[in-house]
Image (cartoon, rainbow, N blue to C red):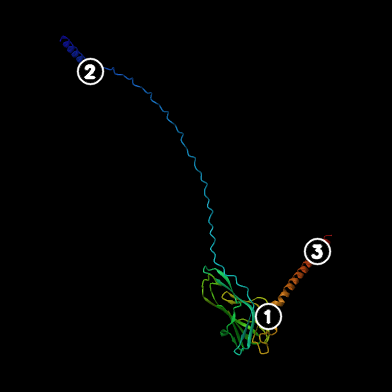
Amino acid sequence: MKWFVVLVAVWALATLAAGQESSTGTSHVPTTHAPTTHAPTTHAPTTHAPTTPAPTTHAPTTHAPTTLAPTTTAAPPTPPATPVNKYVLRDADNQTCMMVTAALQLKVSYLTKDSKWRDAVLVLDNTTTVDPANSSCGHSEQTLALRCGTSLLSLTFTKNETNFLSGIVAEYVLDTMHFPDAQHQGELVKVGNESLHLFGVEQGRSYLCGADSPVPLGGNTTLDVLNVQLQAFVNATVQPEGFGSAVHCVQNNDISNIVPIAVGSALAALVVIVLLAYLVGRSRSRQKGYQSV
């Protein structure tokens, strides 16, 4: 029993001691960590050299000056070569009263819309025909009317002591083909000269001339008559379609001979004058020499 009491006491003490230990716990000395002092990292400032951009030099763009071609008005077309045509006028009985073989053309100076003068040529080409309505076979006056497109040319011959061309009348339209940019486009022009005395020959003979014979008609219009042979008032003794004996124009024969003769004579006279002047001058110089001696 004593031992039981002792054991209980020992057990009680042991239990008490264990309780104290659990209440007291284990005391750990706090570990004091010395503060870690980090030296401040000093970053040296990065100095960037200022970037100076090189100036970009652009070569100046040189534009070639745009040269505008001057506005030009279309020139009139080059007229075709003037053909030599034969025209025969017959009366109501189909008898020949006039024959004309010639190259005929009208030269016209006209005003353009910008008030400038320009030249045009109206050629009586192979389409030209005799216009019976405007022609006549009288006893003292005969008219040959020729129509070419919108143009009309009338040749009037008169008979007295000789047969001669006494009048020419021309009508034409200022069309766009022959008169481009005309100031009065589409206008009908009528010009003429009815006080002529040309190509005169005796009755029964023809007039023949190979040279150009320009005839002014007024209104800045001229009729060129080239390589012509004509005869009006053809009588019954002349064979149909045949000309009488020809009278040649002066220009065909005489002028071609007169010009070189005149030039040669003038040169010969000049040589004689120079020679005489030289001889006279030399004679005077000798006389002065004798007087001084």
In the foreground, 165 or 30: 30
Name the side, left or right, on which 277 lies relative to 141: right
Locate residue 149, reporting x and y percent. Answer: 56, 78
In the foreground, 38 or 130: 38
Name the side, left or right, on which 187 lies relative to 86: left
In whole angstroms, how far apart are the C-alphas of marks 2 and 1? Answer: 170 Å
Which is in the foreground here, disc 2 or disc 1? 2
Marks 2 and 3: CB-CB under 8 Å? no
User: Tag on residue 208?
Assistant: 1
Locate residue 50, reporting x and y percent. Answer: 46, 35
Report the residue at 70% width, 77% height from top: 252
The three-letter amino acid code for the residue at tag 1 is: Leu
Q: Mark 2, residues whose alpha carbon is within 10 Å: few (<14), some, or many (≥20)? A: few
Placement of 79 over or under 198, stated as above or below: above
The three-letter amino acid code for the residue at tag 3 is: Arg
In whole angstroms, how far apart are the C-alphas of marks 1 and 3? Answer: 56 Å
Which one is earlier in the sequence, the residue at label 1 or at label 3? 1
Q: Quadrant of residue 273?
A: bottom right
- Tell me the residue that label 3 is attached to: 282
The three-letter amino acid code for the residue at tag 2 is: Ser
Mark 3, secondary structure of its residue: helix
Placement of 57 over or under 93, stated as above or below: above
Which is in the foreground here, disc 2 or disc 3? 2
User: Tag on residue 121?
Assistant: none
Does residue 285 appear in this view? yes
- Tell me the residue that label 2 is attached to: 22
Locate residue 45, reporting x and y percent. Answer: 42, 30
Marks 1 and 3: CB-CB under 8 Å? no
Which one is earlier in the sequence, the residue at label 2 or at label 3? 2
Name the side, left or right, on which 269 lies relative to 242: right
